[in-house]
Image (spheres, helix red, strand yellow):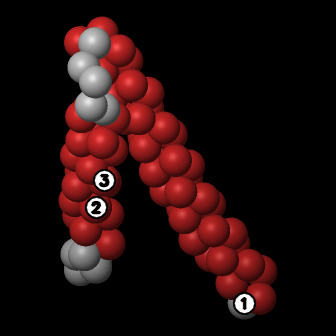
Amino acid sequence: MNEQNEKSNRNVMMRYAGLATTWMVSLAAAVYIGYELDKWLKWGFPLFIILSPIVMLAGLFWQLFKEFGNNKK
């Protein structure tokens, strides 16, 4: 029983570690894409460097809600 509990805890930890990694990489990519768009458009105000992470966060929260919001198994 104890071994089964350890495997379950390890699986949960790996799931959350993967989720955290996905969030960090996605937000870093959104900031980079926003930076490159602002540089390409040569705007004085960093509009896309602000908007792209916000849009990415909305998508990530939607994904989080989809994954953890429906626990009917």
- Alpha-carbon span between mark 1 and mark 3: 39 Å
- Residue occupied by mark 2: 61
Q: Which mark is residue 57?
A: 3
Q: Which mark is residue 23?
A: none
Secondary element under disc 1, as helix, strand or loop, is loop
- Mark 1 or mark 3: whose residue is earlier in sequence: 1
Task: Decide if residue 2 is on the left or right side of residue 63.
Answer: right
Q: How many marks?
A: 3
Which residue is painted at 77% across and 88% down in the image?
2
Question: Looking at this view, is 37 or 22 the one in front?
Answer: 37
Q: Quadrant of the N terminus?
A: bottom right
- Residue drawn where x is 53% and y is 57% of the image: 20
Tell me, yes or no, whether the two marked residues, 2 and 3, touch with CB atoms within 8 Å.
Answer: yes
Q: Earlier in the sequence, mark 1 or mark 2?
A: 1
Q: Classify mark 3: helix, strand or loop.
A: helix
Q: Is residue 55 visible?
A: yes
Q: Tell me the amino acid under the disc marked 3.
A: Leu
Numbered disc in front, either 2 or 3: 3
Three-letter amino acid code of the residue under disc 1: Met
Question: Can residue 56 be seen in this snapshot?
Answer: no
Question: Looking at the image, which is closer to me, 41 or 15?
Answer: 41
Q: Residue furthest right?
A: 3
Residue 23, image x and y in percent? 46, 50
Which residue is at the front of the view, 43 or 51?
Answer: 43
| Percent coordinates x, y for residue 50 in the rendering | 30, 42
x and y percentages locating residue 21 in the rendered image: 56, 49
SS for tag 2?
helix
